[in-house]
Image: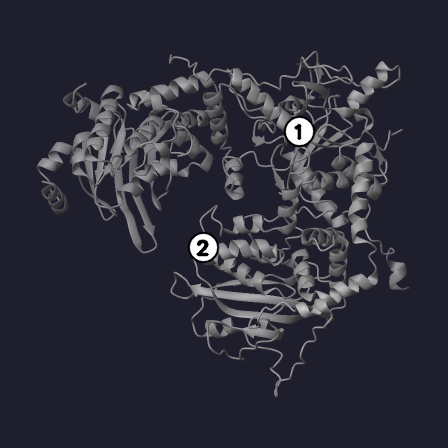
Amino acid sequence: MSVLDRLAPELITGAPLLVMQGIAKRYGPVVALEDVAATVWPGEVLGIVGESGSGKSTLLRMMNLEDTPDTGTYTLALPEVAGNLFDLDRFARRQLCARRIGIVYQNPHQGLLMGHSSSGNVAERLLVAGERRFATLRARAREALDVSEFPLNRMDDPPRLLSGGMQQRVQLAKAIALEPALLLLDEPTTGLDVSVQALVLDTLKRLQRDRAITMVIVSHDLGVIRTMADRVMVMRRGRVVEEGLVDQVFQDPQHPYTQELVHAKL
Amino acid sequence: MSLSNLTRPWAAFSYGFLDPSAKREIRRKMIKAIAVPGCQIPYASREVPIARGWGTGGLQVTLTLIKPASVVKVIDQGADDSVNAASIRRFLSRVSGAGETWDTLAATIVQSRHRIPEERLRDDQVLVLQVPNPEPLRPVQPNMSIARQMHADADYGRLWLVLYEQMVRSGRIMQGAAYPALVNGRHVMTPSPIPRWDVPKLNMARHLTFLSAGREKRLYAVPPFTRVEPLVFSDVPYKVEDHTRLTCHRSGLTGVFMNEIPQAAGGSVFEASDSHLGIKAIRRAEGDAAEIGPLWYQNGEFRG
Amino acid sequence: MAYVATRGGERAIEQAERLYREQLGTIDAARVQGLRDALPWLIDRVMGEASLYDADLAALALAQAGGDLYEAVLLLRAWRTTQPRIAIAAPVLQEDLFTHRRISAAFKDIPGGQILGPTLDYAHRLLATDVLGGADFVPVPVTPAPQAAPAQQPSLAAWQKAMGLVADPPRAEVATDDIPDVTREPLLFPAARAHSLQSLARADTGGVLALGYAAMRGYGNAHPTVNELRLAEAEVMVRHPSGVSFSAGRVKVSQAEVTSKGKSGQLELGFCATFGWNEVKVIAGATLDLNAGGAEKGSAVEEEFVLYHTEPVESSGFCIHFKLPHYVTFQSALDAMRGAAVADPAKEEVPA
């Protein structure tokens, strides 16, 4: 499927997978998010760009149900859930996250058990979702690592013995092992060498192309967003200042802040 | 009217050693433990006259259950004459006037460390297992408050992960004793360090089991007819210790859990771990009328 | 009829106990009295860890255990368990303490004054070997001060609070009879303040010192200054059912308050108190209390870590329990090991 195909109007008029509305969050006097809305269609990649403190990572954590806003609603068009996901109890949230949402954190310590084997990290995800056949666990862990382009001869090594790029691939394998409806990427390549960064982005790009996974990627790096995303949301001080197709926003930025960002990058 | 005729005469210790307030608290916690099978219930856990780690948890439960008509059997590693078992049994009878026995069939309360007797327990018997570490999550989460939260969430992924990695590394499950088991489909418990051989004896059993850790201040229970399922992969069957073909060199018993006795000349001989069952088998062979009850295992197969 | 027999095991434990007791010989009232008189600091330490204030019983426990501290504490704790709780004493306030010794390292002088009291702090630690040669060691008599220090002293922290130097956290008002009692309820985390302080009060002196020292050396997040250290006597005020309050006697107590500058910009306090006079324990304990706030889970200054691992009866009991036979668990592990040796880890299924 080409990019043009996916941007065809009939797809965009279909029902969105993710809808967030009126999201607001304060930490004491500090406004983290203010009246933020986000919509993601199936198979689409939404980029969220902004400097640190813009609220983009907080928003992503809310998409992963790790954090709850003061006000606002969040729905995912999935058969097993209805209504505002922030109203789900702790148990239902955990279940939904484990089965339907995958996440790759910037810091692999947040997403991985560094002392357990890499394949075990992936298998744990399947175990939490209820898989109890050892052969299946083994095969699916191997497969998920393989499509994440992780070297299989190291699949039973613990992440603490692996390079940063490989750790991100283990996180990715863990995130996609259950074929999630939504894949969240929080600065997935920040902190990696430029060459490694390119390779990891290639893997993500290929995965997205082959499996049409719906993704939300947060980055402060316009290059990453340009490579990965179809649409982009520009955030500043807890608000969305501009939103649109990536090419359109980066070619012809409307908001002064976006203009500043784009020019600084160029 | 004076204070002395309004009160009972002062005695150094209460009946059954523990004072009534301690017993009341433990009784309440025991009932709670029965109500939520496999869930660890915190209790105050008083000091008793044996050292922590030497069966103080089991002792407190037994002291709470005991009455003059009780008959207690205490075993350690399956043996009645093991020094610590003998010491606990003597203490129990000393403070309660209860009878002592070595015979599983004659006991009303069986307090045990690391074994469940080979003769099937009845619905009029209570098994009290001494527990050193009540927390099955300890190897993956040493912090008790976090582990409690994990139980509340039924968050047992890490325990499965450990089993997965054992399979990957060794081609089999390496867990020896204290094999974690899911109780009543809800809480994972450690059955105390009993061998894998003994875990099936808790599943849908007729008897009531209390497990109590005095040092760690937690008690839990497996009520009669409650499911106790060891954590296993559906394609890797649960394996008990490979003892079914061994023969006790003293009693001739087979199909029971064995102690291995290394021989100076090399190799090992084996003896029945349930020592009094061995004694009864020897007596019968000598023509005495020793009654042996129905066993959990027959011809090496678990029958329950 | 129950079958009872004395066999090897039972005879062996009986004889082993006799062997131990034979070495200690006859214990009579004079020996107990002698220990009580000769070893007041040890008696204090034992009373603190046993959380049972009775010098005669503590001396008896020491005599019976031949000086093994963990055994003595267990003896007393096990005896204490059997005793009913007949009354709950009124809380003791710092300014009501009959203070023998009171020092602050935070200020040169403090309201009420520094009182050195009995201490070896500035003594030269020379072994009086002459005693062994028959020359008695006779202490030089004390010359009383021209003016006795007042028996009661104000609290330094109260002054600091009034000056706005120390945070004054809101107090939970709890009726005296409802104060949580760690000997009757399990210790759970996050712990009730009363449970934390009670646990520290009966903690193992050596254990508290080891962890407190680690915190002082830099494994903690706060460096302590001794705000106020007191050795004192406290009046135990209990209420008769008729409503009358009366003193049931006095107990020796120690308390330490240590302080460091907190993140709030104000001073933070750590506190520890115990039965008997035991300065090392209360300073180390207060340091641990100071460090507990905001400590990382699983770190050596976190409350759960500290309180679980400084319990003298639990830690010593678990340590010696490893002498018990473990051959069933060992056999079970051996079986798994032998099984693994024949399995072939290289044999790996091909992904479907």
* Residue for point 55% across, 57% down: C209
Instruction: Name the residue nearer the viewer: A178 or A68.
Output: A178
**Chain to which mark 1 belongs:** C
* Residue for point 46% across, 75% down: C107
* Residue for point 87% across, 30% down: C2
In the figure, residue C154 lies in which quadrant?
A: bottom right
Q: Which label is found at residue C220?
A: 2
Residue C340 in the image, given as x and y percentages of width and height? 53, 19
Q: Which label is found at residue C327?
A: 1
Q: Secondary structure at mark 1?
A: helix
| Amino acid type shown at disc 2 | Gly
Nearer mark to the viewer, of 1 and 2: 1
How far apart are labels 1 and 2 at the CA level?
40 Å
Residue C52 in sight from this viewpoint:
yes
Q: Residues within 10 Å of mark 1 (few under 14, many from 20)?
A: some
Quick check: C352 above or below C241? above
